[in-house]
Image (cartoon, rainbow, N blue to C red):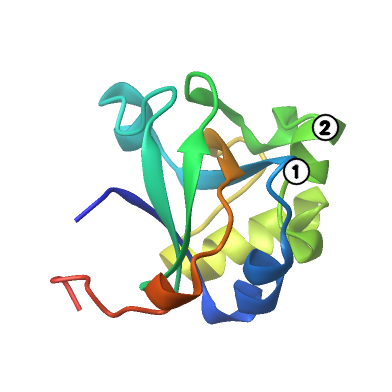
Amino acid sequence: MAKAINWPLQFRDEVIAEDTQSEHIALRLGQLYYENRYWVPDEVVDIRVNHKKIRKAMVVGDLRQCAIRDLSAEDLARLKKPLQNREAVLAFLAEAYNQAVDEDTLVTIVAYKNHPIVPEEMEQQDDPHM
């Protein structure tokens, strides 16, 4: 199974509607992904929603790490639409990770570009962890 970037169900329609030219980012709490270089440049990964594959994407560039307060306007603009401000990012990450999150919390940033959707491969439940 390919590595994946998984989004909650609330982002399903946006993941499907995204183009293949724009660069998107995902945030992950802490340093684990960053220190272990979990995703590497040009790696092809699955973009999943609720653990079901929607499309593939290619990782763009190296992982980055910063405090939430240091996310740039460009970073925020590349997030899912409901997450394009710091307050929304804080609330989302606190809920997703079920822990306290503040502006000093470190996040790992992975940038990616979507591949076209392949309808026959969409929404397969092939995650052995589920």
Q: Is residue 2 left or right of residue 58?
A: left
Q: Residue at x 72, y 27 (%)?
A: 70
What is the crowding at mark 2: few (fewer than 14 residues within 10 Å), some, or many (at least 20)?
few
In the image, residue 62 above or below residue 91: above
Q: Amino acid at mark 2?
A: Glu
Quarter of the image for residue 30 reads top left
Q: Nearer the viewer, residue 46 or 31?
A: 46
- Asked which quadrant contains residue 69, the reply is top right
Q: Residue at x 48, y 19 (%)?
A: 62
Residue 62, above or below 108: above
Report which residue position mark 1 lands on: 78
Answer above or below: position of 122 versus 89. below
Q: Residue at x 53, y 23 (%)?
A: 64
Q: Which mark is residue 64?
A: none
Query: Considering the numbered disc 2 on the image, is that residue within a helix, a strand or a loop?
Result: helix
In front here: 30 or 61? 61
Image coordinates for residue 38, horizontal then vertical, percent: 30, 33
Write down the residue under mark 2: 74
The residue shown at (20%, 79%) is: 130
Q: x%, y% of residue 44?
A: 39, 39
**Residue 47, placed above or below residue 121:** above
**Pointers 1 and 2 in contact (C-beta within 8 Å):** yes
